[in-house]
Amino acid sequence: MRRKSVLVLLMILFSAARLFTATRFTGAEDQSGRAILNPQNVPSWFETGQFRSARWDGAPLEAEKGILTGWVNYTRDDPRQVLKATRDWYNPRTIEFLRKAQLNWVWVTCSNGFSPATERAQQETLTRYIVPAWALPKRRTGEWVLRSQSGRVLARMPDGALYFEQAYFPFVDESGPRTISEAMPESMWTAIASPPGPHADGEDGLRCLAEGARRLREKTDRAIIGLFGGNLLEVGQFFYRNDNFFMPL
């Protein structure tokens, strides 16, 4: 057994040595002065300055772990409000801290090693935090649902499923919306926003997109495709349901 372990270790070391010796240094350096291997192969999102991360631990069970572990300032009397801040850390208001610090990746606390039943509330808190507010799913018995602003269930994801399925078709409902503008907020495909989400929202949204496109153009002479939701035929399917939409055609 020991001989087999040594052999596996030698194979790993040999493979690593081949990887590094076969890679040529280009002279590019990171901020520490160390040479970067093949910088042209580094994804744009992982380039120096683009990947800015932080530990973002929080929520009630993180506070309890601090108490049980004896962390500094994690005491029941909480004179410095450290427990209070930790318990309320996964509050959408703290996302503003990420923006001000220009962070784009965070480590969040999904599990602390407690029982699944104990951690369920923690995970639901985290779900509300990491899922955009405009697409916030709600838990029901045996499933998750997405609702419109009017309260209709637009999509369902039963336990064990990987995706949400459309549950409401505006123009099939005889008492539902009658016009396109009325139907738009009542279909999962047109009511639930999608990425780039908050990055392109607000007053600086268009500027951020323009700057990103400009940086991309400076790095390549290839064609750049910008996608948008111009679903001219699909919207008919979304509103009428496939069978009702295709039969008249």
Image (cartoon, helix red, strand yellow):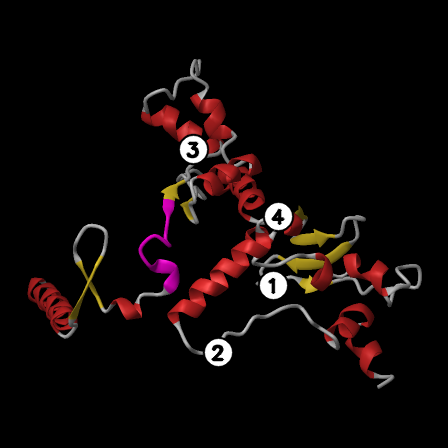
Q: Is residue 58 visible?
A: yes
| Vertical placement of residue 191 versus 98, above or below | below
Foreground: disc 4 or disc 1: 4
Q: Can residue 137 be seen in this view?
A: no
Q: Is mark 2 on a helix, strand or loop?
A: loop
* Quadrant position of residue 68: top left
Which amino acid is tagged 3?
A: Glu
The correct choice, above or below, for 226 with respect to 152 in the image is below
The amino acid type, in three-letter code, at marker 1 is Tyr
The magenta region covers 44-53
Quarter of the picture containing the C terminus is: bottom right
**Residue named by callout 3:** 62
Task: Give the amino acid at mark 4.
Answer: Glu
The mark nearer the N terminus, 4 or 2, is 4
- Give the structural element (helix, strand or loop) at label 4: loop
Name the residue rendered at 79%, 52% in the picture: 152
